[in-house]
Image (cartoon, rainbow, N blue to C red):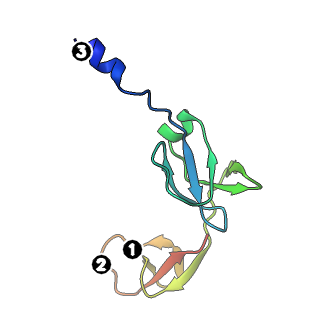
Amino acid sequence: MSDELYKTFPKLELEYRLYYDAKGKPISMSSHEHPDGSYIVITQEQYNNPNYNCRVVNSKLQFDTSDHFHVQLKKSTRGVAVVKGYAALVAETEYPEIEYYDRVS
């Protein structure tokens, strides 16, 4: 009986998509009931193990493979709290002089 019930449902065809913004930065992923937007088709492995350290350039996925992870920051009124004058030192506890930075890229 259960085998017959299983055969009555159509097979769900999955297409794994990575959606990105105008600068090529990843926004989201989907495998079915796809929303509108710019996307590229990715593998099931890429979908199951997302790595957002990438960009879409000329409809191709490019990963940052450098030894160091680079992030451009800008001063802000919110974002990550850091020691004033030292953007690389994150203030994880209360600190008398802090400023904030947000990620640009």
SS label for mark 2: loop
Please say if the residues under marks 2 and 1 sit with CB atoms less than 8 Å apart.
yes
Residue farthest to the left, as pictured: 1
Q: Is residue 38 left or right of residue 10?
A: right
User: Which one is nearer the viewer's eye here, 65 or 85?
Assistant: 65
Q: In the image, what residue type sits under mark 2?
A: Glu
Residue closest to the eye, 6 or 14: 6
Amino acid of disc 3: Ser
Q: Position of residue 22 (x, y in %)?
A: 65, 68
Q: Are marks 1 and 3 in contact (CB under 8 Å)?
A: no
Q: Position of residue 11 (x, y in %)?
A: 44, 27
Task: Write down the residue under mark 1.
Answer: 91
Q: Examine the rendered structure and indicate whether residue 65 appears above or below residue 5.
A: below
Q: Quadrant of residue 4?
A: top left
Which residue does the numbered mark 3 point to in the structure image?
Answer: 2
Q: Earlier in the sequence, mark 1 or mark 3?
A: 3
Q: Nearer the viewer, mark 2 or mark 3?
A: 3
Label placed on residue 94? 2
Residue kind at label 1, given as amino acid type: Ala
